[in-house]
Amino acid sequence: MHNSIYSPAEDSFMISENLKKEIPKLIKKNPDLKFFEIGSGSGINLETAFGFGIKKQNIFSSDINPSAIKHCKNLGFNCIQSDLFEKIPKQKFDLIIFNPPYLPEELREPKNSKSATTGGKKGNEIIIKFLKQTKNYLNKNGKIFIITSSLSEKINFEKLNYKSKVIDRKKLFFEEIYLWKLEDFV
Ligand SMILES: C[S@@+](CC[C@H](N)C(=O)[O-])C[C@H]1O[C@@H](n2cnc3c(N)ncnc32)[C@H](O)[C@@H]1O
């Protein structure tokens, strides 16, 4: 059975809206900015990155879900199947974004949507794994945009060696989601 592609939701829109504000500023400083999205899903953030000035050849993406890969490739983006950075060739990016599966395990969650939403028993396990791997792929002064939820265990970004700042937040019916901007402590 194929997993369904995540339909853009509040979290997707929160990243996309903030990319629209941040990308033009970043491009001004570095017109050759290299962008990478893990878990690109429907490609909504790839479209935003392209629409707001990142060169298509500098936009890279991946997903664990083959249906999402096929979809993003059909949109004309470079997209490869990989579990986090497992299959990503060694290189450096200036902006890495991830709207990750960030919720604690919910046993009733159907299997075909689970991999887009469930981050592990505490909800933050995939994010922590991602943040450890990202170190090898982030350029000096590079930035990470990532979403977390109030329903999951808090992440100690400092302990993982990242400077962190909440740049947007949104109250939903039963949770609050946060968009973080992270930078490596060098
Ligand atoms: C919440 S959805 C976000 C999709 C899209 N970026 C958006 O903002 O609408 C999470 C995405 O991450 C992908 N994903 C989940 N675990 C992953 C992993 N270990 N490595 C790569 N992608 C993963 C899912 O297949 C899904 O497409």
Image (cartoon, rainbow, N blue to C red):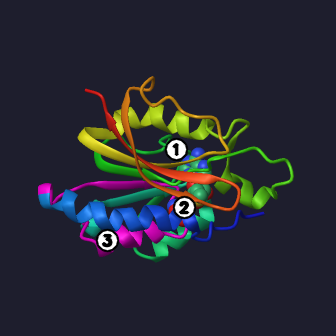
Cα–Cα span, label 3 and label 2: 19 Å
Q: Give the percent coordinates (x, y) of residue 183.
A: 32, 38
SS at mark 2 in the image = helix
SS at mark 1 in the image = loop
**Label 2 CB, ligand 1: below 8 Å?**
yes
Quadrant holding the N terminus: bottom right
- Of 51 and 63, the residue lying toward us: 51
Residue shown at the point (66%, 53%) measured from the top left: 175
Quadrant holding the C terminus: top left
Residue 155 visible, this angle: yes
- Of 185 and 74, the residue lying toward us: 185
Q: Give the percent coordinates (x, y) of residue 148.
A: 55, 47
In the picture shown, does residue 60 fall above or below 143? below
Q: Which mark is residue 84?
A: 1
Does residue 87 appear left or right of residue 56 in this picture? Answer: right
What kind of residue is marked 2? Asp
SS at mark 3 in the image = helix
- Mark positioned earlier in the residue sequence (1 or 3): 3
Residue shown at the point (48%, 44%) measured from the top left: 87
Q: Give the percent coordinates (x, y) of residue 94.
A: 27, 48
Residue under pointer 3: 50
Queried whether the magenta region covers residue 130, the answer comes back as no
**Label 1 CB, ligand 1: below 8 Å?**
yes
Q: Which mark is residue 11?
A: 2
Please state the extent of the stretch shown in magenta in the rendering. Answer: 29-54
